[in-house]
Image: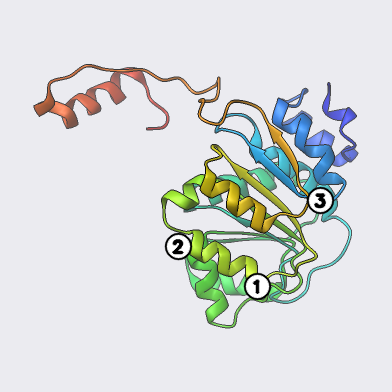
Amino acid sequence: MDFSELDLSPEILQAVSDAGYTKPTPIQEQAIPHVKRGRDVLGCAQTGTGKTASFVLPMVDMLTAGRVRVRMPRSLILEPTRELATQVAASFELYGKHHRLAMALLIGGESFVDQERKLDRGVDVLIATPGRLLDLYGRGKILLSDTRILVIDEADRMLDMGFIPDVERIVGLLPESRQTLFFSATMPVEIRKLADAFLHDPVEVSVAPPASPAATVAQSIAVIDSGDKREALRRLIRSEDVKNA
């Protein structure tokens, strides 16, 4: 299957082509049509599967129609860490370059003033970590009553990091008539219960057994002396040219 068979706009197809991609990954092939139809989606997909584009591509198309309102984001993407939030923001910039979508990134360590200024202008896409979002909500700087698309990404990491109470509070601030996209690398009982609470009649998509690593992620084991762990790790990172650790 090619991207051209996924009912994406010519502008999106051009952006995808410019990025060097011609064929969707399995998670993209499965999820994109359902997202475009407005269905809730429960996705089990690991890092390296192309999961981010499976919601970014259709969202860019879907948000082209309509207009922004002050402090009322049209869509919300929740990420557990600032690094992941920044990566998703970069994907929107990459694939939305032929569209005029306004985006704001709400993460810790950045100026409240700059973030508030963007919210005051209105945004189509709001990408946030739960804590920073609730900080700004508590200051009266953001309203979620007009948010029509919610993405909860890396739900299992949200659970591990203790963010689920914040996520539950945020979901309670959103309209019930929203579309929800819920992604997790694993699907333990706790995550399944959350999905059941947040989603309405979802389509389930999965590209690998819940506990398996993505094929694009390389793993290795090193045997070292117990007293030399830090220096051994430094040597391994230098010698193996590790990109992420």
Please state, as top left, top right, bottom left or bottom right, where the C terminus lies in the image. top left
Dot in front, 2 or 3? 2
Way the structure is coloured: rainbow
Sooner in the amino-acid sequence: mark 2 or mark 3? 3
Label 3 Cα neighbours within 10 Å, binned few <14 / some 14-19 / many ≥20: some
Is residue 206 toward the left or the right of residue 100 in the image?
A: left
**107 lies above or below 43:** below
Q: Which corner quadrant of the image does residue 50 belong to?
A: top right
Please name the residue that numbered disc 2 is placed on.
Answer: 108
Is residue 155 toward the left or the right of residue 68 in the image?
A: left
Q: Is residue 236 visible?
A: yes
Dot in front, 1 or 3? 1
Secondary element type, mark 1: loop
Secondary element type, mark 2: loop
Secondary element type, mark 3: loop
Please name the residue that numbered disc 3 is placed on.
Answer: 99
Query: In the image, residue 5 lies at what x, y percent?
Result: 89, 28
Q: Is residue 25 visible?
A: no
Please name the residue that numbered disc 1 is placed on.
Answer: 173
Query: In the image, residue 33 lies at what x, y percent?
Result: 84, 38
Residue 13 - label: none
Query: In the image, residue 180 lies at what x, y percent?
Result: 72, 54
- Residue at (80% x, 65% y) in the render: 177
The kind of residue on which mark 3 rests is: His
Dot in front, 1 or 2? 1
**193 lies above or below 8:** below
The kind of residue on which mark 2 rests is: Gly
Q: Nearer the viewer, residue 235 or 182?
A: 182
Label 2 Cα neighbours within 10 Å, binned few <14 / some 14-19 / many ≥20: some
Tell whether label 3 touches label 1 (CB within 8 Å): no
The residues bearing labels 1 and 2 have C-alpha atoms spaced at a distance of 21 Å
